[in-house]
Image (spheres, rainbow, N blue to C red):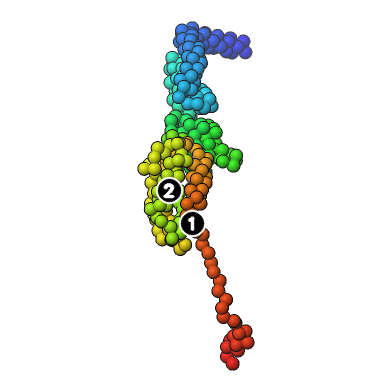
Amino acid sequence: MKEQFNVAWSNLIEKLQGWFNAIIESLPNFILAILVMIVAYYAARYINKFVTKAVGKKVNQPSISKTIGRISAVVVVLAGLFLCLGILDLGKTLTSLLAGAGVVGLAIGLALQGTLANTFAGVILSFRKKIQVGHWIETSGFEGEVMDINLKDFTLKEADNNMVIIPNKTILENPMKNYSLTQKMRIFLECGVGYESDLELVQKLTKEAMADTFDTVDSSDDVEFYYKEFGGSSINFLCRFWVNGEKAIDRLRATNKAIIALKKTFDANDINIPFPIRTLQFDNKLNINQSINQEEGV
C-alpha cells in the first residue's frame, strides 16, 4: 500500500513538473498574447471613435455612425483574439472557432434575413446624398417629409401630420420622387372656355396673368399655352410655367394662386368658364293605362 502511494505521488509530482515546465516555456508567448489583447482593446476604442467621427461627417444619423464605429471596433478585437490564439499555438482552437462562427453566422443570417436586409439598406440610404432628412419625397404610395433614417426603417411625415414607417428595403427597391433635389417645379394648370370665346385673346390673357402673378415668370413668353380638345361644353387648354419650390405644398400654393388670378382675369374680360349643364325635357305626357295594357298584351 505504501509503495502504491509512493508511485502515485511520484507520478503526480512528475505531472506537475511537466505542467510547470510547459508553463515556463509558454510564458513568453502568454505574456505576448496578453499584450496583443491589450493593444487590440485600446486600438478598438480609438478606431471606434475615429470611424464614428469620420462617418458622422457624411451621415447625419448618429445611430448609423455609432453602429459602424462599433462594428469596426469588434472587427479589431476579433483580429486581436485570433492573433493571440495563433501566438499560443492553439491552431485547432482557432479552426474550431472559425468553423463555429461560420455555422452560427449562417443560422443567424437565415433567421434574420429580413432584419439584416433592412439594416444594410439603412446603411446604404444613409450614405446617399440624394436622400436626406428634411427632403420631401414620394415613394411606395406615400408622400411627405423625411424625418428619420435609421437601421430599421424610414420615417415620413405626411402633409396631414401622420407618420409613415416604411422598411428600408422597400425604399431601396422602389422608385422614389424627390422634390427637394431641384429648386424649381413646373405647374400644370388646366381649364376650359366657352365656344363663343376669342381663343387668341384667351391665350394672351392667360399668359399675361401668369407672368404678372409669379416672380419666377419673367414674361408671357415663358408661359406655355396649348389648346387640348373640343370638350362637351368647353374648349379645354393646358397652361404650364415654372415656380420656385421644393415641396408638394409649394405646388398646391402656386396652383391655388394661379387659379385665383386666372378667374379674376377671365371675369374682368367677360370670358366664360362653362360647366356641364344637363337639361331634362318632359314635353310628352305619359299614358299610364296605355303602357300597362301594352305590357299585358291587351
Please report the residue visible at 43 percent of the width from the left and 48 percent of the height from the top.
206
Q: How many marks?
A: 2
Please say if 183 is above or below 229. Answer: above
Mark 1: which secondary structure?
Answer: loop
Which residue is situated farthest in the front direction here? Answer: 269
Q: What amino acid is at disc 1?
A: Asn
Q: Quadrant of residue 280?
A: bottom right
* Camera-nearest residue between 138 and 87: 138
Give amino acid for label 2: Leu
User: Relative to 214, does residue 37 appear above or below in the rendering?
Assistant: above
Q: Decide which of 283, 187 is in the foreground and name it.
A: 283
CA–CA distance between discs 1 and 2?
13 Å
The numbered mark at residue 272 is: 1
Q: Position of residue 188 (x, y in %)?
A: 44, 47
The numbered mark at residue 103 is none
Label 2 crowd bin: few (<14), some (14–19), many (20+), radius 10 Å: some
Of the image marks 1 and 2, the number of the one nearer the N terminus = 2
Q: In the image, what residue occupies the spot 43% across and 41% down?
A: 211
Q: What element does badge 2 sit on?
A: helix
Q: Residue at x 47, y 55 (%)?
A: 271
Mark 1, other Cα within 10 Å: few <14 / some 14–19 / many ≥20: some
Q: Which residue is mark 2?
A: 205
Please provide percent x and percent y for residue 168. Answer: 50, 37
The answer to whether residue 192 of the structure is visible from this angle is yes
Left or right: 205 as drawn, with respect to 13: left
Q: Is residue 118 above or below residue 68?
A: below
Whole-percent x, y for residue 171 in the image = 48, 39
Depth check, front residue: 227 or 86: 227
Quarter of the rendering occupied by the C terminus: bottom right
Tell me the quadrant of the picture where the N terminus can be found.
Answer: top right
Q: Which residue is depicted at the point 52% across and 41% down?
A: 253
